[in-house]
Image (tube, helix red, strand yellow):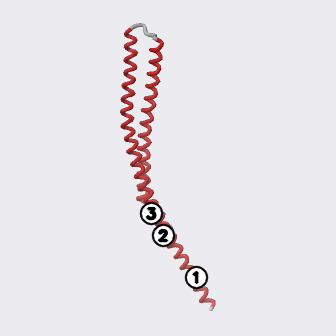
Amino acid sequence: MKFEFSLESVLKVRKHEEQLQEQRLAEELSRKKVLNRQKIELRKKIKALIEDADQGNFENLHNLKRHRSYVQEYHKRIYQINQSLEVIENSVKTERDKLALVHKKRKIIEKVKEEEYELFLEKVSKLEQKVMDEIAGQTFSRSK
């Protein structure tokens, strides 16, 4: 006698949904990581530009204005990245919530499977006991 879970197909679907949700979350986290790297790089560039300005290596006013516009452009890009990071943070939170929900649904089905397996073991045990009682009864009746 073999155990067959009645909701095995539902469990497979729930596991697949959970894997897909984990992938979506990983993609969002990857996007966040890329933006954070870009932000760090831009900050390094700004720091380098400020250090150049501190040394005063400007030949004329045009170079100074160009230098200033680079710094402003980098600050704008950092601001844009921060805006994108806020959106991605919200998306990551949403994906985490969805993953928790899908995980909970899968766990519910697994709990049902465990309970169904326990009932199966009980049934098998009772069947074995019945067979053993029958064998004992036949052995007793033959010995008379």
Q: Secondary structure at mark 2?
A: helix
Of the pair 53 and 41, the residue shown nearer to us: 53
Looking at the image, is mark 1 or mark 3 nearer the viewer? 3
- Nearest to the eye among marks 1 and 2: give it: 2
Residue 36's image quarter? top left
Q: Earlier in the sequence, mark 1 or mark 2?
A: 2
Tell me the residue that label 3 is attached to.
112
Q: Residue furthest top?
A: 59
Q: Which mark is residue 12?
A: none
**Which of these two is toward me, 47 or 112?**
47
- The answer to whether the residues at label 2 and label 3 have Cβ atoms under 8 Å apart is no
Q: Is residue 141 above or below residue 23?
A: below
Q: Amino acid at mark 2?
A: Leu
Residue 70 coordinates in the image, percent (x, y): 39, 19
- Residue at x 39%, y 49% (from the top left corner): 98
Q: Residues within 10 Å of mark 1 (few under 14, many from 20)?
A: few
Type of the residue with mark 1: Ile
**Which residue position holds label 1?**
135
Whether 114 is drawn above or below 56: the answer is: below
Look at mark 2 in the image and give the residue it sits on.
119
Q: Residue at x 56, y 82 (%)?
A: 133
**The C terminus is located in which quarter?**
bottom right
In terms of depth relative to the viewer, which is nearer, 67 or 11? Answer: 67
Q: Are marks 1 and 3 in contact (CB under 8 Å)?
A: no
